[in-house]
Amino acid sequence: MFSTLTPLDWKRRAVKYYPEKVAVIDEEKAFTYKEFAERTDRLSIALHEAGIQKGDHVAVMLPNTHYMLECFYGICQLGAAMVPLNYRLKAEDLEYIINHSDAKMLIVDEEFSGPIEEIAEDLSLEQIVVVSVPGQETSLKGVDYEAFLQGTAENAVLPEVEIDENQLMTLNYTSGTTSNPKGVMLTHRSNYLNAANFMYHLGVSQDDVYLHTLPMFHANGWGGVWAITAAGGTHVCLRKVDPPHILDLFERHHISLLCGAPTVVNMLINEPKANETSISSSPRMATAGAPPAAALIHKAQEVLGLNMIHVYGLTETSPFILYCEWKKEFDAKSADEQAAIKARQGIELAFNGETKVIHQDGEEVAWNGEELGEIITRGNVVMKGYYKDAEKTADAIKDGWFHTGDLAVTYPDGYIEIRDRAKDMIISGGENISSTEIEGVLYQHSDVMEAAVIAIPHEKWGEVPKAIIVPNENASATEQAIIDYCRAELAHFKAPKAVAFVDALPKTATGKLQKYRLREMHWEGPKKVN
């Protein structure tokens, strides 16, 4: 009576009940669930004939195309583990990850093959498969993806593989800032339960048309690669984040759901075309990756009519562990109050396990919205550990709890709200200052498109806040005007002591702000603020 928990079973269900329904749309191409299943099965057969077996690792470096979606199923149903790669990484990082992951094969998009060409001779790979892209050329030696699929033996059948739900399904590498990237081991069970959370809490149904704005390589598209198939919905692929194109797709395909970091939300609402676009489908959009400012959520709902859903998690937790559940009683609040509530990370999801905020002594903080502590979690979605790194695994998982490093408060209703990453908290004259709190105020200023706040050295106070701002077009605010604005909205000691205006903020491929790079830029060279 035991059935293995694996998201792969949802492909079987989709083919059984929705064989002729469009499963995947990728620009001018479209595949029904029956056709999509045939392609993924053909990929599995080709991999098997190439020597890939249960327990082997296959690295994949592709954008959000149907090929990437096929790999999640074709590789994993063999019992092999998929290693999704960030195609924006430098060659040396890719070399480390591919070799450290023990990948036997790499499937790579021709457009992003340049870094692989640089390191090809130093990779411990047995074979490379290249997805051809019109107009692109590569000197990389590898077999063409379509030829790889079609080159299988005639009448070959999908090998039967017994899968243990606790075996490795995906090996997802986190970005390395001060050290090498870490390989997060996610199992069939953790991926299944996270995707179940995605499906249930984001309200996924067979009528949904899901736009893959979020990179699939990032924590397996937060589970969207599995959840949409589970419900029999339609996947709409997106090769790159292009706001005008996204707005076109909203109407062309009647997009009903998407996910993305706050920076993607910001790109959409600041796209000039947004003011001219009426989105009839009123899409739901889940956002995470950095604490979104309430003002940003308010603008997204007001300008584009998006129904914003705030979720929170980490690669190490598959990734969801909190979401901002909307209660009917919130409907009576003002638009600003609603946006402030939606900016909270929220409460536990149904299938992830237990999450709470604790003091350094391990005791839970009071539910008063004031006591600051660290978010910790345990349960079904926590990683198996870091690949080949017992020491870092032990540092992260203590007494059965995964420590996130995020500092937060808990409100009387149990809703958790992040105040900062532990490493981003500003300690000025002994006072803790939340950089995200200041950013939330800055986003309310009409001249601010994007904002980040970091600590800079100060001779008297040790460190003080500095705001780095990407201004809106035709903005006129000066450094002093921004400081005065913040002093009017915040306790004076929390207001930035310096402001810099820049053209862009450094971000990861998934849109997460890289504050460590800002600190490197603004701590080196400039004299200390007095």
Image (cartoon, rainbow, N blue to C red):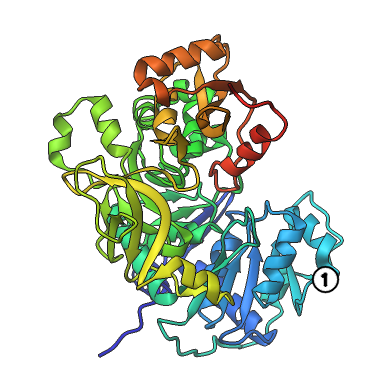
Asked whether the viewer can see residue 185, the reply is no
Residue 402: percent from the left, percent from the top?
A: 39, 65
User: In which quadrant of the rendered view does residue 425 lie?
Assistant: top left
Compared with 304, 145 (above or below) is below
Which residue is located at x 24 percent, y 56 percent? 364
Element at label 1: helix
Classify 10 Å Cα crowding around label 1: few (below 14), some (14-19), many (20 and above). few
Asked whether the viewer can see residue 31, the reply is yes
Q: Quadrant of the C terminus?
A: top right
400 horizontally vs 266: left or right: left
Compared with 196, 102 (above or below) is below
Which residue is located at x 38 percent, y 70 percent? 192
151 horizontally vs 140: left or right: left
User: In which quadrant of the rendered view does residue 330 lie?
Assistant: top left
User: In which quadrant of the rendered view does residue 472 lie?
Assistant: top right
Which residue is located at x 28 percent, y 66 percent? 353
Residue nearer the viewer, 395 or 168: 395
402 horizontally vs 179: left or right: left
Residue 208: percent from the left, percent from the top?
A: 35, 51
Residue nearer the viewer, 398 or 518: 398
Query: For mark 1, what is the residue?
Result: 122
Q: Amino acid at mark 1?
A: Asp
Compared with 530, 13 (above or below) is below
Residue 21: percent from the left, percent from the top?
A: 41, 61
460 horizontally vs 351: left or right: right
Residue nearer the viewer, 131 or 219: 219
Compared with 155, 202 (above or below) is above
Residue 254: percent from the left, percent from the top?
A: 40, 41
